[in-house]
Image (cartoon, rainbow, N blue to C red):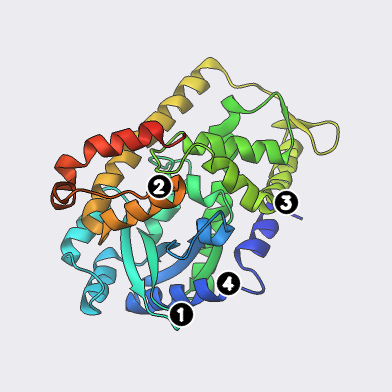
Amino acid sequence: MSLVAAIRARLIPAVPDPQAAAVARFVAEAGGGAVRSVVFFGSRKTRAQPDVFSAFDLFVVTDGYRAFYRSLRGAGLLRRHPTLGTALNAILPPNQVSIPVPGAEGPRRAKCAVVSADHLRRETSPARHDHFFLGRLFQWAELAWSADPEATEEILACVVNAHVLTYRWARPWLPTRFDAGEYARALLRISYSAEIRPEPEGRAQAIWDAQQGYLRDVYVVLLRELAERGELREDPPGHFAVVRPAGRWERVRLAAYLRWSLVRATLRWAKYMITFDDWLEFILRKARRHSGEDIVLTSRERKAPLIFLWPRFLRYLRHKDR
């Protein structure tokens, strides 16, 4: 089986997740024809310890930012002016947008990473600006909604590229010998180093535990294709070694790439405070879920979080792994 076939079978499952499909369809309809496709990923997809408050993580791929935001605004689902969202999306994609989705079991929340088709193709290619898209799409994802077969093939190509490129950015930190599972765990560790995240350090292990079947099955195909091209050596079967170890310049260049990705990821957090409605409550729920502690803010912290919340935030980051 080729890598494309292995990913297609899992990206477009015979029995899609019914809740994710319903949420994706609502978002696509709210986008008023500007949505090309919706990709479902994250803790609800992998079942990596979600709870009832966990949002549905979605990549919402659009034909144009302005039309998408205008449609959301017209449906009463967007507080900010469409021009602001369009400008921020063009500068540093994606925008994170929170969309409440009605349902028979109560409202659900779609956490939408909004990106144009052109930007997604660029950010899953060697010409990408940082690690944000690759860090999510090298993992288990599902195409929850698509406008047409062409849009489906576009997403498949981007997800395949995200998997293929893992070898380029992971080479310096791979073990001397590894199997598909060890390769995938290395990818998770490296990716988490490229972002400031509210989850504790063990989160990478939890993600591995939740999706190891997918990661093993897909990456053994990739590693064998790399061995056929002479990049890796397979001996014994299922175990691999790098033929040409990473040189000093490659290590320096990729370390700089991850540091730059960390800078851009941190800038996105500042942008999400503008684009993501009720961002403070969302972050608090996430921190409570992963820390197990009840976090109560003072009235001053709630009124001016950008001024008074920093000491608590930095203290949380220092102690979250405990």
Residue ID at (51%, 22%): 251
The numbered disc on residue 293 is 2
| Nearer to the camera, 145 or 191 | 191
Q: Position of residue 214 (x, y in %)?
A: 67, 53
Q: Position of residue 60 (x, y in %)?
A: 40, 64
For marks 4 and 2, give the one nearer the viewer.
2
Q: Label 1, label 3: how many angstroms apart (C-alpha)?
A: 34 Å
Q: Residue furthest bottom?
A: 104
For marks 1 and 3, give the one nearer the viewer.
1
Mark 2: few/some/many CA within 10 Å (<14, 14-19, 20+): few
> Which residue has dot 1 on it?
105
> Which residue has dot 3 on it?
217
> Which residue has dot 4 on it?
17
Whether residue 229 is visible, yes or no, is yes
Query: Are dots 1 and 4 in contact, CB under 8 Å?
Result: no
| Residue type at numbered disc 4 | Asp
Q: Which one is earlier in the sequence, the residue at label 3 or at label 2?
A: 3
Whether residue 94 is visible, yes or no, is no
Tell me the SS state at disc 3.
helix
Q: Which one is earlier in the sequence, the residue at label 4 or at label 2?
A: 4
Tell me the SS state at disc 1.
loop
Query: Are dots 4 and 2 in contact, CB under 8 Å?
Result: no
